[in-house]
Amino acid sequence: MPRANDAITARLLAEVDRRRDELASLLSSLVQFSTVNYGDAHDGFDGIPNGNELPCAIWLRDWIRNARISGDVYEAAPTRGSLIARLPGDGRHPDWRLTSPSLMLMSHLDVVPVEDAHRWPHPPFAGVVAGGTVFGRGSRDAKGIAAASAMAMAVLRQANVRLGGDLVMLAAADEESGGRFGAGWVTSHPDLGARVRTTAALNEGGGSVLTLPGNGLGYTWATGEKGRLEVTLVVSGSSGHASAPWRAQNSLERAATVLSRLQAHSPEIHTSHPIFEALRKAFGLPGELNPETLERVIATIGDVGRGAVGLMLGASRITIVPTMIQAGVKSNSIPGTCTITCDVRALPGQDVAYVQGVLNALLDGLPWVTISIAETAISNDSPWDHPLRDAATDGIRSATGRSDAVLLPALCSGFTDSRFARANGTHVFDCAPGDWRDTSSDTGVHGTNERILIDSLVTMTRFFVATACNYLGVAD
Ligand SMILES: [Zn+2]
């Protein structure tokens, strides 16, 4: 199947531009569904069950069906609906066996809670569209991606473009609380798993813009996620009356030693991730980046490439960060034990044994500390060298009109549903790019006044259309 010719792509992208207002109003409608995910054990608020993605998923399914695309909603549990839609490629299989290559556009319909609605300029669930912006919780994370995915499929369907392989959309429930009722369930389901097992997928978690020297554009293309471990350090001492500290061993004072050791930790530096070579080229740095030169490079590019520095820091080292501390029962009693909890983000290959080794060395000579480690998510990765990357590089150039745009490999420090799709046999790349002039790429995500420029929604949709055509091929 040949790659999309430029004339077809240009016609499709012009159609995306033409449907700009419809795209904004599609997102506004999605934002107006309350799909707040408070976490697994929660019953929800005001009679609305926790998550409650079902009505939103059904509404989006109907929108998609109106566009003459097949889609269905599946419930992992009551009210927890996930939408799977498919635009069959040439040589379609009616029984849902996917044609190859196949591409999935991933998003999620649940959102995080709003902390203080009064601090928002518009009510967070009103879906206000004003000043070229869609406001509201989920407008970026990730209903904006769901809207762009649905519109991309609708534009391709309406134009009767014959793609060389299937284009699938998954708008999942429960991403914000671990995916047990969403992508985790869908990908491991005996029937549904195969429907979402594509050769490649695009998901949230990347697509941030970095300005490179010479004003080139770098869009992050996250190929993997760090692992997460939770470390509990129990510091033992002995309790006693606070008026006679010499008769007790204050566990809080011992904890201070532990905290300062953690703070002084200088982690092993790795520069094997493809991000380093890509940034070296992008910033025109001589030679090879290695652990010895990395810190110097970081200092050199400093403010010019603050985004790049972040990428390098994240991909080069484990982080061990104390996040909670607990001790004491009363203000006049010396606490006999103190518990310190740490969030650990590990590079691919750094397992429990590795982390144990790091902590043993770090806390050497402190026999009163016990260490326990729980691995809550294992690091996962897709290849940097994958045909979708070339398709997406051309896609981002068509979408933005910037021939100097490049993709920069990245490693996510957080989690998305990508890990479930990877475990299901799909290579997933996190890239949901917006307009390059939209410098507020993370505006309000998980915070106050979440919003997205309509320009960014349009760019994202154009990117999905162009990348799908490039990757799947188009029959004339
Ligand atoms: Zn998200």
Image (spheres, rainbow, N blue to C red):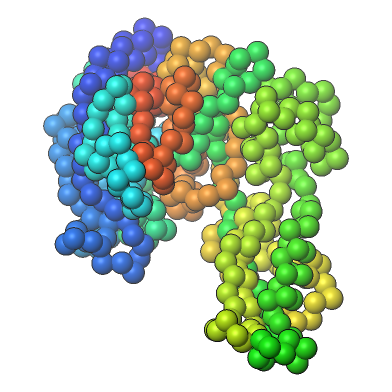
Q: Is residue 42 left or right of residue 430?
A: left
Q: Quadrant of the N terminus?
A: top left
Q: Is residue 62 left or right of residue 96?
A: left
Q: Nearer the viewer, residue 339 or 220?
A: 339
Q: Is residue 425 left or right of residue 188?
A: right
- Tell me what residue is drawn at x 41 percent, y 39 percent: 444
Residue 374 at x, y percent in the picture: 58, 70
Residue 224 at x, y percent in the picture: 57, 44
- Tell me what residue is drawn at x 37 percent, y 13 percent: 9
Does residue 285 sit above or below 198 in this rendering?
Answer: above
- Tell me what residue is drawn at x 36 percent, y 62 percent: 39
Q: Quadrant of the C terminus?
A: top left
**Would you identify the image quadrant in which residue 122 lies?**
top left
Residue 205 at x, y percent in the picture: 48, 40
Does residue 25 sit above or below 374 in this rendering?
Answer: above
- Tell me what residue is drawn at x 56 percent, y 44 percent: 412
**Total marks in image:** 0
Q: Residue furthest front?
A: 243
Q: Nearer the viewer, residue 56 or 169?
A: 56
**Would you identify the image quadrant in which residue 290 lies?**
top right
Residue 255 at x, y percent in the picture: 71, 73
**Would you identify the image quadrant in which residue 271 lies?**
top right
Does residue 96 sit above or below 90 in this rendering?
Answer: below
The answer to whether residue 361 is visible is yes
The answer to whether residue 371 is visible is no
Q: Nearer the viewer, residue 38 or 382?
A: 38
Does residue 209 sit above or below 169 in this rendering?
Answer: above
Q: Is residue 149 left or right of residue 228?
A: left
